[in-house]
Amino acid sequence: MDREIRLKRLRFRAWHRGVKEADLLIGGFFDQHGKGWNDAEMDLFEALLEEQDVDIMAWAMGTAAVPERYAGTVMTALKTLNYVPISK
């Protein structure tokens, strides 16, 4: 699959989780980091999108242990939480 098409699909899935908080966390994360990912990182993010939003959010906030299969650069970046847009 073409890289740009894959990125568009990942972005759509990241921003359409069903819960606004998850959209902001996961979609904001994708917008900040997605374009720079290699194929392995895109594979990992694609697998992550299959997980429940509450689990992803707990891993990002550090309230639950990250499964070994997601440990690495993508999860480390997700845990920074500096990409979530906050309106004032």
Image (spheres, rainbow, N blue to C red):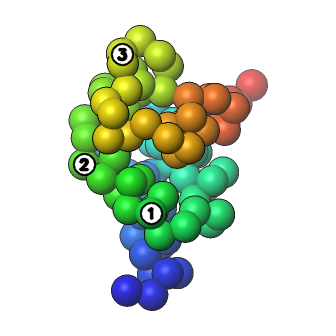
Q: SS at mark 1?
A: helix
Instruction: Name which residue lies at 52% across and 81% down.
Output: 4
Q: Which three-letter amino acid code belongs to the residue tagged 3?
A: Ala
Q: Residues within 10 Å of mark 2 (few under 14, many from 20)?
A: few
Residue placed under numbered mark 3 in the picture: 64
Secondary structure, mark 3, is: loop
* Residue 8 horizontal/vertical position (percent): 47, 72
* Residue occupying image coordinates x 49% and y 19%: 61
Closer to us: 85 or 3: 3
Whether residue 46 is visible to the viewer of this picture, yes or no, is yes
**Residue shown at 33% from the left, 33% from the top:** 68
Foreground: disc 3 or disc 1: 1
Q: Nearer the viewer, mark 2 or mark 1?
A: 1
Q: Which residue is mark 1?
A: 40
User: Closer to the observer: label 2 or label 3?
Assistant: 3
The residues bearing labels 2 and 3 have C-alpha atoms spaced at a distance of 17 Å
Residue 36 on image: x %, y %: 65, 63
Q: Amino acid at mark 1?
A: Ala
> How many other residues sit within 10 Å of disc 3, few (<14), some (14-19) or many (≥20)?
few
Q: Amino acid at mark 2?
A: Glu
Q: Which percent across, then down, holds residue 48?
A: 34, 46
Residue 5, position in %: x, y? Answer: 45, 81
Q: Which residue is mark 2?
A: 50
The quadrant of the image that shows the C terminus is top right
Left or right: residue 36 compared with residue 46: right
- The residue sitting at the top extreme is 63
> Is there CB contact under 8 Å for labels 2 and 3?
no
Do the CB atoms of the residues marked 3 and 1 lie less than 8 Å apart? no
